Image: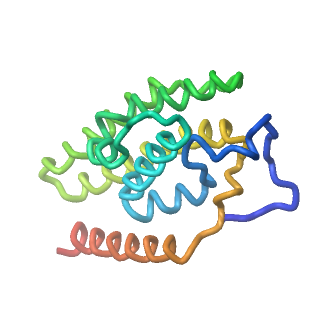
Amino acid sequence: MIALSDSPATVEFPGAATAPPDFYVVCKSKLALLFVSTSGFFLIYWFYRNWKLYRAATGNKVLPLFRTILGVFFVYSLFTKIDHRIGASNLKYRWYPRSLALAVILLACTGSALMWLPDVQIRFALSLLVLFLQTCCLLRVQNAINYLAGDVEGLGNSKLTFANGIWVALGLCWWGLAIIGFYVL
């Protein structure tokens, strides 16, 4: 699923190779795999890494753990900070961060509201739709982050690690339990 080519599609930006990234750079297929296989729980790590790298890159006194725990309240802030860093780097990239932030917030609220649906099978199907839409939004944001870092394909973080494998395995166990719970019990 995650393949490396002989000619990576990277964009060279002045200073990109010498400075650490402002935000979490990751290959989109790796991100999608981790996000979907963990039923969206990977978003917690993704938020934390982005806030931690942002703090290191800017020196701003943000609290990554606090902003991760209350992630839904800081989605807009994170996305606009990514957009501002793109602008400050004299790069042009259209990705509609405000609309994506609104979509992520609404999808999070929708996902939470689905638990009140009485029909388990409809709830499960709609949860899958929400997860798909969240993945699409997250990948669009990751495109912007990777572009800013000068690693458009995210090849610097494209290989699955042992820890990633553990998370995927745990996530697949979770999916198995969810399917049993929704369709068998």
Q: Residue furthest right?
A: 7
Residue 146 lies, in percent from the top left, at 64, 43
Q: Looking at the picture, does residue 40 appear above or below residue 180?
A: above
Give the image quarter of residue 92.
Answer: top right
Q: State left or right for residue 170 relative to residue 79.
A: left
Q: Nearer the viewer, residue 106 or 50?
A: 50
Q: In the rendered view of the protein, which quadrant contains the N terminus?
A: bottom right
Residue 40 lies, in percent from the top left, at 38, 55
Residue 169 lies, in percent from the top left, at 43, 77
Residue drawn at the location 25% of the way across and 52% of the way down = 122
Q: State left or right for residue 181 relative to residue 129.
A: left
Q: Nearer the viewer, residue 61 or 113?
A: 61
Q: In the rendered view of the protein, which quadrant contains the C terminus?
A: bottom left
Marker count (numbered): 0
Q: Nearer the viewer, residue 117 or 38?
A: 38
Q: State left or right for residue 48 relative to residue 147.
A: left
Colour scheme used in the picture?
A: rainbow
Residue drawn at the location 58% of the way across and 40% of the way down = 22
Give the image quarter of residue 119.
Answer: bottom left
Residue drawn at the location 79% of the way across and 46% of the way down = 10
Give the image quarter of residue 13.
Answer: top right
Q: Nearer the viewer, residue 163 or 171?
A: 163
Q: State left or right for residue 107 relative to residue 56.
A: left
Residue drawn at the location 71% of the way across and 56% of the way down = 155
